[in-house]
Amino acid sequence: MSVEILDGRTVQSFVEDEGAFNASVDGRFAALDINHDGLLSYPEMAAELMSLRVLDKHFGVDEAGVLGPDELAGLYRGLFARFDRDGDGAVDREEFRAEMKEVMLAVASGLGFLPVQMVVAEGSFLKVAVDRELARAA
């Protein structure tokens, strides 16, 4: 983890740099593709989605009694369905790229134009975006 300063333009510029963005996204895809079949199954992605605990921490569903295990599993299945655009039960590299692009552009829009200080994980897409911008400025 590191503390970085970034804004929406940092993230948007990273997404618009197709080579850098695709290389980063493809690396994450390969890391998630445990059986190396070129597709991400729900079990391959579920562990990643759940490890982020986005729903748990940011939307308060980890509080006692808010959601049961079946409801939480349904939310994660819904997230998976966003990635599985053709509904065939697996996420291919192009679907993963397309959804990650939408996610990152939404992050960029949410950050806006004013710089913010943020804790980012090493190897995360946001960290890669910041490092890319710093390298370009040097």
Image (tube, rainbow, N blue to C red):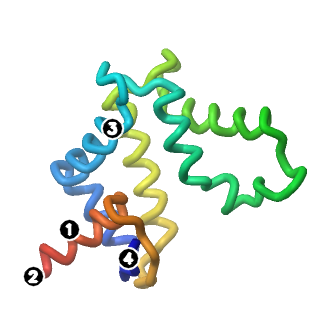
Does dot 3 land on a helix, a strand or a loop?
helix
Nearest to N terminus: mark 4 or mark 1? 4
Q: CA distance from mark 4 to mark 3?
A: 23 Å
Horizontal placement of 17 versus 53: left or right?
left
Reading the image, the residue beneath label 3 is: 29
Give the class, few, some or many, for how many residues have Cα within 10 Å of label 2's Cα (few <14, many ≥20): few
Reading the image, the residue beneath label 4 is: 2
- Pointer 3 with pointer 1, Cβ within 8 A: no
Q: CA distance from mark 4 to mark 2?
A: 19 Å
Picture quadrant where residue 93 is located: top left
Nearest to N terminus: mark 3 or mark 2? 3
Amino acid residing under circle 3: Phe
Amino acid residing under circle 4: Ser
Work out whether 95 lies above or below 62. Answer: above
Give the quadrant of the N terminus: bottom left
Give the class, few, some or many, for how many residues have Cα within 10 Å of label 4's Cα (few <14, many ≥20): few
Q: Position of residue 36 (x, y in %)?
A: 29, 24
- Pointer 4 with pointer 1, Cβ within 8 A: no
Q: Residue at x 48, y 58 (%)?
A: 106
Picture quadrant where residue 15 is located: bottom left
Amino acid residing under circle 1: Arg
Q: Position of residue 116 (x, y in %)?
A: 45, 83
Q: CA distance from mark 3 to mark 1?
A: 20 Å
Reading the image, the residue beneath label 1 is: 132
Mark 3 or 2, closer to the camera: 3
Looking at this view, name the residue that lies furthest to the left. 138
